[in-house]
């Protein structure tokens, strides 16, 4: 143990190893932050629940895109009756009727146009009574009043996607997200500018006493959102950015421990006993090396759609008899012939006591560099399956993020952030483990230490 600790202290001699340790520490902290702030069950629910995403814009770039432009790109604005500036007035009329008007101000101080507009209304009314008709208007900062929709038959709760209103499109002769915010609607599209200032959403209607307008809200979807942007399903990509770290690290570390420890122990047992057992292990290893692991995993994932733990078990099983078996066997053969083990046999030590008490611990330090360097291999393997659409369908991971971006044409649409962010994180994780692994290899391998 002391020898191992003293060897690890030598990492300080290698600046590259210190850089790798910093990278690994960053991903460990990122993993802990993800697990603490968004528990596993909550992350899966948010990733698959459409209701969680209604207030999120579709295909919005990260907010840091503003750093590379001279404009202030629009953020998402949600305004409603609950705002202090909003007003709701009721004016009594004849025959038990009343006029209701709700005015909701929206402060818009951005250089570009929004991506979508969504309005929701909630009403209370008596049964078996004709529902009132309402009209919705839009007042711009310069005072221009635009009719959005007229004589809408109300119901308990309703959602209006303003962008899809054909009559409004015809009146404005352009998409509402441009027409409702443009300074001048007569100029060509590439020359239009968004008018900044205070807009007002006005809802008017006449209804009977006993009917009431409970809620009105307007969501003006922006073009940038959050630290990582959003995808085509309005999902905040910060969630897979965060949760990709613990999933990737856990998968890579557990697969490396399971596969390398199994190979190490079996190599020691086979080398010590020799004979048919050793020949059987070598034959299985030779066959397993020939078998293409990735196509096998693709076939199994395609046929059974396994969860992440099933994939992990398959990866460990397919890597037990890996090429490392030959390397460990060569080291065990040299160690087996030493007088030390002859003495252990002479005083009556059993075979398994010699293997697990004396043989394996002698070679164990050499396992550390191999273990560290193989972790990113398994991380990339899990990401590869997810990129191919064969990973766990319920988990937000880096590979799943790249797969969604590729399938939705993110690169063609200019949404590079969707694919570049997880790709950078995958490369950073692999680079960190590689730097530490190569430094450890130089420390534990005497031949490399002399170079």
Image (tube, rainbow, N blue to C red):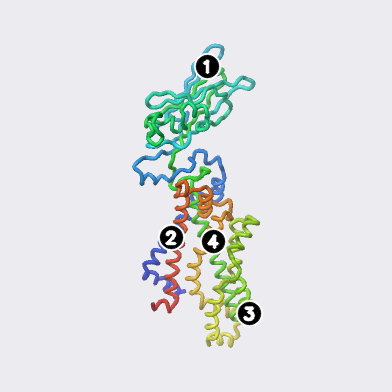
- Nearer the N terminus, badge 3 or badge 4? 3
Q: Which mark is residue 206?
A: none
Q: According to the image, label 3 marks what residue?
A: 279
Give the quarter of the image for residue 156: top right
Front disc: 2 or 3: 3
| Distance (Cα) linking label 2 and label 4 | 22 Å
Image coordinates for residue 314, horizontal then vertical, percent: 61, 63
Quadrant occupied by the C terminus? bottom left
Q: Residue at x 45, y 46 (%)?
A: 229
Q: Which mark is residue 381?
A: 4
Tell me the element at label 4. helix
Q: Specify few, some or many for label 3: CA neighbours under 10 Å numbering under 14, 14-19, or 20 or more.
A: few
Q: According to the image, label 1 marks what residue?
A: 98
Q: Is residue 286 left or right of residue 149?
A: right
The number of callouts visible is 4
In this orientation, which residue lies closer to the viewer: 293 or 229? 293
Front disc: 1 or 3: 3
| Distance (Cα) linking label 1 and label 2 | 65 Å
In this orientation, which residue lies closer to the viewer: 426 or 409? 409
Give the quarter of the image for residue 122: top right
Give the quarter of the image for residue 441: bottom left
């Amino acid at each position: 143990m002391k020898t191992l600790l003293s060897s690890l202290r030598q990492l300080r001699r290698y600046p590259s190893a210190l850089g790798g340790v910093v990278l690994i520490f960053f991903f460990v902290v990122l993993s802990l932050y993800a697990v603490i702030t968004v528990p596993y069950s909550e992350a899966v629910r948010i990733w698959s629940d459409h209701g969680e995403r209604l207030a999120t814009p579709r295909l919005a770039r990260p907010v840091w895109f503003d750093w590379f432009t001279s404009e202030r790109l629009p953020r998402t604005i949600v305004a409603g009756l609950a705002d202090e500036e909003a007003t709701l007035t009721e004016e009594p009329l004849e025959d038990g009727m009343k006029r209701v008007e709700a005015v909701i101000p929206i402060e818009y101080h951005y250089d570009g146009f929004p991506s979508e507009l969504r309005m929701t209304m909630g009403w209370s009314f008596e049964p078996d009574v004709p529902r009132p008709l309402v009209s919705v208007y839009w007042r711009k900062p310069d005072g221009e009043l635009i009719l959005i929709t007229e004589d809408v038959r109300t119901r308990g709760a309703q959602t209006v996607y303003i962008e899809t209103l054909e009559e409004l499109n015809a009146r404005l002769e352009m998409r509402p997200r441009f027409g409702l915010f443009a300074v001048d609607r007569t100029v060509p599209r590439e020359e239009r500018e968004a008018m900044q200032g205070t807009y007002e959403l006005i809802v008017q209607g006449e209804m009977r006493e006993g009917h009431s307008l409970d809620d009105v809200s307007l969501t003006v979807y922006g073009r940038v959102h959050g630290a990582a942007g959003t995808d085509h399903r309005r999902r905040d990509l910060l969630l897979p950015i965060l949760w990709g770290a613990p999933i990737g690290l856990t998968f890579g570390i557990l697969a490396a421990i399971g596969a390398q420890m199994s190979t190490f122990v079996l190599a020691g047992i086979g080398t010590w006993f020799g004979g048919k057992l050793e020949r059987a292990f070598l034959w299985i290893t030779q066959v397993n090396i020939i078998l293409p692991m990735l196509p096998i995993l693709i076939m199994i994932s395609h046929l059974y759609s396994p969860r992440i733990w099933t994939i992990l078990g398959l990866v460990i099983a397919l890597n037990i008899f890996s090429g490392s078996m030959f390397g460990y066997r060569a080291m065990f053969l040299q160690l087996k012939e030493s007088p030390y083990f002859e003495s252990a046999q002479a005083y009556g030590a059993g075979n398994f006591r010699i293997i697990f008490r004396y043989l394996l611990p002698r070679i164990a330090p050499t396992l550390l560099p191999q273990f560290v360097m193989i972790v990113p291999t398994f991380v990339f393997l899990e990401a590869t399956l997810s990129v191919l659409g064969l990973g766990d369908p319920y988990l937000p991971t880096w590979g799943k993020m790249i797969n969604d971006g590729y399938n939705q044409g993110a690169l063609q649409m200019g949404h590079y952030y969707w694919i570049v962010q997880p790709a950078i994180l995958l490369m950073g994780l692999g680079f960190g483990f590689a730097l530490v692994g190569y430094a450890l290899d130089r420390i534990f391998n005497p031949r490399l230490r002399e170079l």
